[in-house]
Amino acid sequence: MAIPADPTADQASNPATDEPAGKAVDAPAHPDHGGSNAEAADEDYEEENEEEEELDGPAAEAAENEKVKAVFRRLSEAPVGIRVHDVTIRGNTKTRDALIEAEAVDLIRSAATVQDLVRAASIANARLRRLEVFDSVLITLDSGPPELPGTTNVVIEVVEAANPIDGNVGCFSKPEAKSWSVEGSLRLKNIFGYGDIWDASGAYGWDQSSEISIGVSLPRFRSIPAPLTARASLLSHDWLKFSSYKERLLGLSFGLLSSMHHDLSYNLTWRTLTDPSQMASKSIRKQLGHNLLSAMKYTYTIDQRDSHVRPTKGYAFVSTSQVGGLWDRKGLRFFRQEFDIRGAVPFGFYNAALNAGISAGVVLPLGRGFMGSSSSVPDRFFLGGHSSPVCSLGGLTSLLGFKTRGIGPTELRRFVPSESVMDDSAASPGRDYLGGDFAVSAFADLSFDLPLKLFRDAGIHGHAFLTAGNLAKLSESEFRNFSFSEFGRTFRSSAGVGIILPTKLFRVEINYCYILKQFEHDRGKTGIQFSFSSPM
């Protein structure tokens, strides 16, 4: 008797756990959570070797049900040994057998017990679905040849995507840049049968920012088990409002390693900074022009939270290290390190939970006399913005109530006289925000359900928050003037309350922010603030 297994595959299962991810389908009576059922032990159905009389109607059905229950009882009592005799792949007209074998067959063949086989089949199903090239995946565990007791045959049946092309277009908010943009993407799946996904994307912002990129990803290449990606992109962004420069990036990026906890990538980028306004401060003008950025980036992530949008328990930790100037000594040479740690604690009433976190980062130029040289402004840290600290895992959190790039070291812009202004003293050129080489931010957020059932059913809830952070310059010998006591004394902070409206795509916050502490030239404001944040 063979029972097909078709678990949902958007959750990857850990082989070490007892309950693989996914839902059991087509076999609702099976106790395993992984969805792949233990029909492989047909020998166990016949272990008593009793000759049964042929039964018809309800009696036959009752006998069959009792036989299945007996097998399930045995499987729940102790491991049942089994050996995979054969694995058959069906339905792949375009996809290479080698890809399916690498993702699923080796894992299935390694199972030594029925219980292990059920878990392995569930994990294999999830892996194949994550390739995004199949409409459905069905794994059937059947009895082996009669002459080989204690064996099973496994059939992997896939249905390749009927339409290899998909795309989307939409209007999105970018809180970090204080802008809106129209973005679209187009994907071609499994063109060459290696699970390859080719994509092209573009974006245009109302602030004259734009991005065009094309890329390809492979789930594995030859003997390399990790996914590989490559992308070429052209990005243009306007920071004139904040720091008097426009940035254009033309580059290539390669994803070398990507797993649950580790991510390694290499970027080769030609960066151009310009100042069309000709009003940039002296510090910005010194950095205008072309630079080559050759950098390796490594990210280590642990995320044990129960939700990315509204965590109520668990913890998360992210460490990001970046080294620039690996191959070209004339390019940008720097070391950049960030840490982000946070946790969530439930309170047990009104679904209340406290989220708290702290982030820190440092960037230092490399080379002879590095502490006396200047770091690149785009590589520095900036604080402020409207994005939710709860959703922004992986870097410095925003300070609610402060505008984008709204705190930290500043410098007066160059004054350019205008014919329309008769009194030069009446025209203020403004200031450029320069960012910092060392930054720390922290937040605490208490979320809770609202009393009305209508709000609870829709997921709408309230929160109270406290945010704080600070920046400091270390390069150009400024580290000599740095002291932790002064750094702590000049922390900016804000507090407030708000209502959160979660959606499938992003999280909307309507907050009242109160500025607790700010200094001259900071751009903080007490009042109502709207926030649109996408979970990571």
Image (spheres, grey):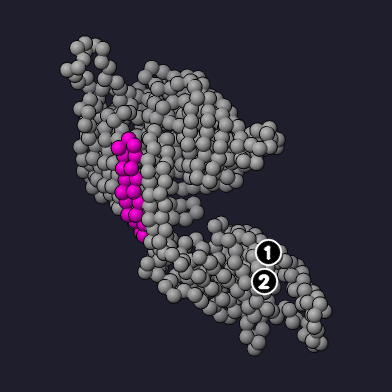
Q: Is residue 200 left or right of residue 47?
A: left
Question: Which structural element holds mark 2?
Answer: loop
Where residue 418 sits, quadrant-wise, is top left
Identify the disc placed on residue 372: none
- Whether residue 200 is in magenta: the answer is yes
- Whether residue 205 is in magenta: the answer is yes
Q: CA distance from mark 2 to mark 1?
A: 9 Å
Residue at x 37% of width, y 67% of height: 191
**Which residue is at the front of the view, 64 or 292?**
64
Q: Tell me whether circle 2 and circle 1 mark residues in contact (CB < 8 Å).
A: yes
Count of numbered circles in the view: 2
**Which residue is at the front of the view, 397 or 62?**
62
Which callout, 2 or 1, points at the residue further toward the start of the chain?
1
Give the residue type at disc 1. Answer: Asp
- Tell me if I can see residue 378 in this picture: no
Question: Could you classify mark 1 by the number of other residues whose Cα lies within 10 Å: few (under 14), some (14-19), or many (20 or more)?
Answer: many
The residue that mark 2 highlights is 38
- Of the 4 image quadrants, the one containing the N terminus is bottom right
The residue at the far left in this view is: 419
Q: Magenta segment, which residues?
A: 197-217
Question: Could you classify mark 2 by the number of other residues whose Cα lies within 10 Å: few (under 14), some (14-19), or many (20 or more)?
Answer: many
Residue 227 rendering spot, x and y as whole percentages: 42, 60
Where residue 378 sits, quadrant-wise, is top left
Identify the disc placed on residue 32: 1
Give the residue type at disc 2. Answer: Ala
Q: Is residue 82 left or right of residue 390?
A: right
Residue 145 rendering spot, x and y as whole percentages: 62, 85
Residue at x 53% of width, y 73% of height: 157
Question: Which structural element holds mark 1?
Answer: loop
Q: Main secondary structure of the magenta part?
A: strand
